Amino acid sequence: MNPLLLTTLPTRELLFGVEDSVVLTFHYVLFVLAAIVFLVGAYKWYRFISTGRRDEERLDNLGSRIWLMLKDGFAFVRLYVREAKMGIMHILILWGFILLTIGTIVLTIADHTPFEFFKGTFYLIHEFLMDSAGVAFLLGLAIAIANRYGLKPSRFKKKWEKANDDGLVLILLVVIGILGFLVEGMRIAIGMDAYTAYIGALLGRILPWGLGTYRFLWSAHSILALIFIALIPFTKLAHVIAAPLNILTRSNRHPGVARGIEDEEYMGAIEVKDLQWRDLLSSLACMRCGRCQDACPATNSNTTLSPMHLMQNLRYLGNTAFGMLGMRGNLKEGQDTMLLDNVLDMEAVWACTTCRACMEMCPVYIEQMEIIQEMRRGVVESGEAPPDIRDLLTNITKQRNPWGEAKYKRDAWAKDVGVPKVKDNPEFEWLWWVGCAHSFDNRNKPIAVKIAQILEELGINYATLGREEGCCGNDVRRVGEEGLFQMLKEENETAFQKYGVERIIATSPHCFNTFKNEYEGYNVKFLLEVIYEAIKDGRIKFKKPINRKVTFHDPCYLGRYNGMYELPREILKAIPGIELVEMPRNREKSFCCGAGGGNLVREYPGDDRPNNIRAREAAETGADVLAVACPFCMIMLEDGVKSVGVDDRLQVLDVIELVWESAFSEE
Ligand code: SF4
Ligand code: SF4
């Protein structure tokens, strides 16, 4: 190319004003120091993460994992669909930062290589993109600051007391961004930059020019950027690296399947090293956004449990065990790495209702609930479970139901109904698994009678196990008694084999989830699926209008565990007269009734129980019926509406009762 033409192309002097070798050498030394500090911190966390177990496949189907990481870790789709403003904020900050970093690397290459590409159109576009990236970066930070310190959404309410770097990180980034523009503005003030650097051009008109000030600002910008790099492993900034890796390694298990136990010697999570390595990585990926605790019934009930604190405490424990720079031995050398009381206290371990809301809400797929379940296994195995959990396990062991009702009473509800048993109807097609709540609880027993009548009316060839029915094992597994769960499973499978059971209709979402996802080889339907099919093919015809305003409460084990959100609503909408209204927290955001994970039969800790909170939410919709599709929810919410004093205007009814009333009632 004509060298004269080259000189006429727009460009600028690289490293203008700081080409002085002393200044540059100082910054190169600082860069090496920042890189060393970063690597020391990263190595500490690598050693921390390496102490975890390797039980679960976390890198299979790599293609789809990488796609998920790009989608949710870099494009923030999961966050955007739930909270558009926060999704945009993250995109602005991350992509602004990435573009600025790439632009700086390009400058470095241009300055340190003989290639003369930093001129003409390339140069003009580069300057434009750098300014645009800077604007995006600062705009994103402004939204973050306004949200955290101005709007203060409820998710920030329960703070993690040891956190002291939230403000520091934001201020550091803002100052780096502003300094970048000031440096550019000063350069332009003496005609040393392009018009496409539009923010710099604007500043260049108003900033006073002075080489000393310029050098000071350039150095401050550079030093702060290097401090930022060095701080990444030591602050919440670690999530910038850990969060995409955490998304990459999310579990591919079905949501309804609890973590299995691969190692026979594993007794549950007692120390940090008993957790999976991915759980330890997750503790770095957690950016204290508070979304999990905002959705958590235990946190909302003011118990000591916060899934966010769990993750932060775990990271803190690793930090303490290894020392700030990772020089202090390792986790296998008898340091205090016990999980109980260090990451969760006893109340918190048992306050979890296993609702999965934390996992559903977490933008980076952290498995808080599964860590709690691992800890429960550890507590149960250590013989330290609280008395009410021990009672629950004893009741199920002896009588196969959580209340300890005598086994022989299991089929008493059906004595006047003529429900067929497997021995009476050996040619049955479907086994109706009645479940403990429908068999023993007084509010649910009449619903079981209506279910029997509906199955009869629909001409379904079914039978029950009668007194031979036991416990599916759902709660047992969720409170951490894996051995008893396996025993119950084996016992039930033996009975299924004996009577040739291949298809199961379940009437509790808890039993449904367990048979469908944690037993193998059965065709399992939830009762409402059977009802829905019958409505569709005309076997159920609604006769009587139900002129009531109804709000539906999603059961966790139906919704978040099995993705069944619309089907119960479709049934309710099919009933003439019903006006369906939604609570603000519905579908995957639904708020748990508080019964799961063994809490149905416990005195729940905290000063505002989940069922009371949910009953108030339902009453606020103005509905006069709170419809449920789970016998546990029925028990909890009936209690809730009474406790908060809205039972005179809000009736809790099972969807089945509404179907029966409209289609089968003779009155
Ligand atoms: S599963 Fe539910 S109760 Fe348990 S920690 Fe998560 S949100 Fe809280
Ligand atoms: S665990 Fe997830 S949802 Fe909870 S604070 Fe951390 S990043 Fe946010």
Image (cartoon, helix red, strand yellow):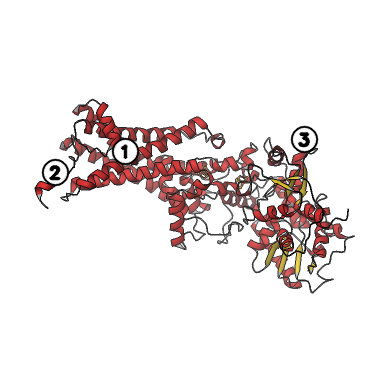
Amino acid type of disc 2?
A: Thr
Point out the tag, 1 or 2, that comes first from the N-terminus. Answer: 2
Please name the residue shown 46% across and 48% down the image: 76
Name the residue carrying label 2: 8
Q: Is residue 378 above or below residue 182?
A: below
Q: Is residue 219 visible?
A: no
Point out the tag, 3 or 2, that comes first from the N-terminus. Answer: 2
- Judged by depth in the image, the label closer to the viewer, 3 or 1, is 3
Q: Is residue 547 visible?
A: yes
Q: Are marks 3 and 1 in contact (CB under 8 Å)?
A: no
Label 2 neighbour load within 10 Å: few <14, some 14-19, many 20+: few
Q: Residue furthest bottom?
A: 427
Answer with the quarter of the image where residue 138 lies.
top left
Please name the residue shown 9% across and 46% down the image: 4
Name the residue carrying label 3: 645
Where is residue 553? Give x, y as percent.
Answer: 69, 47
Task: Report the label total.
Answer: 3
Name the residue carrying label 1: 225
Where disc 2 sits, the SS reads helix
Where is residue 347? Give x, y as percent.
Answer: 64, 41
Is 118 situated left or right of 638 in this image?
left
Q: Residue furthest right?
A: 416
Where is residue 21? Give x, y as percent.
Answer: 16, 38
Cα–Cα span, label 3 and label 2: 82 Å
Q: Nearer the viewer, residue 554 or 415?
A: 554
Q: Nearer the viewer, residue 71 or 577?
A: 577
Amino acid type of disc 1?
A: Ala
Amino acid type of disc 3?
A: Gly
